[in-house]
């Protein structure tokens, strides 16, 4: 069933009006008619089954909620992915697949060895495109929220944001790392309330991290983790880590 996302304050007595691109997509691309059903998610974990009541050409579509349920598709923990800027369109792929793997938020950042550098005049446009990729992925895989994609931050700002998580995983190829599996077994456990800790996952670019950057991350309280015996590409590593987290939190129950 087609899936759309709204803010909760857009619901008025079981009536929702979809406008703009969503209305155009329903009317023109999907060619839906009055009486057909769609799913609308309110970004609060609720999904509403709705029936189309009227069209204002392709400018607005009015639907009525006939059933509401709490989504079961969201992960048991919030994972924020901090991805150093990779070359080409790799970040697009990372965003799409990370949303499918259950990521809560994606924050690109610029590190010392990034080949790609931030251009202020195009950053807003790139961020908007990345958010559209996240939304399309969320619709495709049945999420009840659209994971946010932030504008690119500096390495220092990334460390500040990552430090807010209960568990920080700094994925590193250098010496002194602890295997990811061991960290998850020891630190990624349910609390008294039955919830898993929030996680920050930090991934480097093609050139990895400098020794100085690794020291700053570790001094800031992050765990330097290794991802196994093979070297993973920058676009593979985040999906590997997210998959391991999903396995530890969802696939053993």
Image: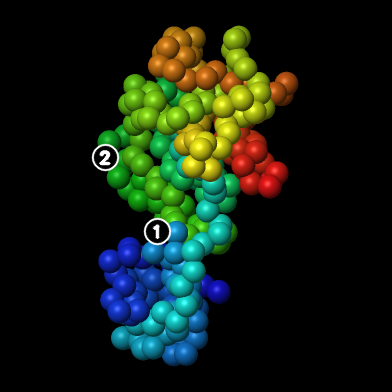
Residue at the spot x=39%, y=88% of the render?
Answer: 53
Residue 35 vs residue 247: left or right?
left
* Coordinates of residue 223 in the picture (x, y in percent): 52, 20
- 91 or 220: nearer the viewer: 220
Q: Is residue 6 above or below residue 180?
A: below
Residue that numbered label 2 is attached to = 121
Residue at the spot x=39%, y=59% of the render?
Answer: 43
Residue at the spot x=43%, y=55% of the render?
Answer: 146
* Coordinates of residue 133 in the picture (x, y in percent): 46, 53
Q: Earlier in the sequence, mark 1 or mark 2?
A: 1
Residue 44 tag number: 1
Secondary structure at numbered mark 1:
loop
Name the quadrant containing residue 117. top left
Q: Is residue 84 above or below residue 193?
A: above
* Coordinates of residue 108 in the picture (x, y in percent): 41, 35
Is residue 243 at least partly visible in the picture? no
Residue at the spot x=41%, y=79% of the render?
Answer: 65
Residue density around tag 1, few if under 14, some if 14–19, many if 20 or more, within 10 Å: few
């Amino acid at each position: 069933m087609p899936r759309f996302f709204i803010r909760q304050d857009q619901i008025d007595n079981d009536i929702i009006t979809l406008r703009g691109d969503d209305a155009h997509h329903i009317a023109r691309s999907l060619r839906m008619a009055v009486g057909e059903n769609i799913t609308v998610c309110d970004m609060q974990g609720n999904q509403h089954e709705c029936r189309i009541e009227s069209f204002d050409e392709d400018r607005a579509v009015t639907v009525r909620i006939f059933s509401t349920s709490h989504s079961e598709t969201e992960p048991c923990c919030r994972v924020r992915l901090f991805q150093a800027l990779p070359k080409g369109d790799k970040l697009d792929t990372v965003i799409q697949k990370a949303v499918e793997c259950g990521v809560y938020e994606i924050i690109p950042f610029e590190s010392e060895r990034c080949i790609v550098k931030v251009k202020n005049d195009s950053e807003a446009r790139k961020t908007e495109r990345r958010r559209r990729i996240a939304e399309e992925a969320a619709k495709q895989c049945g999420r009840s929220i659209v994971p946010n994609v932030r504008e690119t931050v500096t390495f220092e700002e990334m460390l500040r944001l990552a430090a807010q998580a209960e568990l920080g995983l700094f994925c590193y190829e250098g010496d002194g790392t602890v295997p990811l599996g061991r960290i998850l077994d020891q630190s990624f456990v349910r609390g008294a309330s039955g919830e898993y800790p929030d996680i920050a996952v930090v991934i480097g670019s093609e050139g990895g991290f400098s020794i100085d950057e690794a020291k700053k991350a570790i001094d800031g309280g992050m765990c330097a983790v290794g991802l196994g015996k093979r070297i993973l590409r920058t676009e593979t590593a985040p999906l590997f880590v997210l998959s391991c987290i999903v396995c530890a939190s969802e696939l053993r129950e």
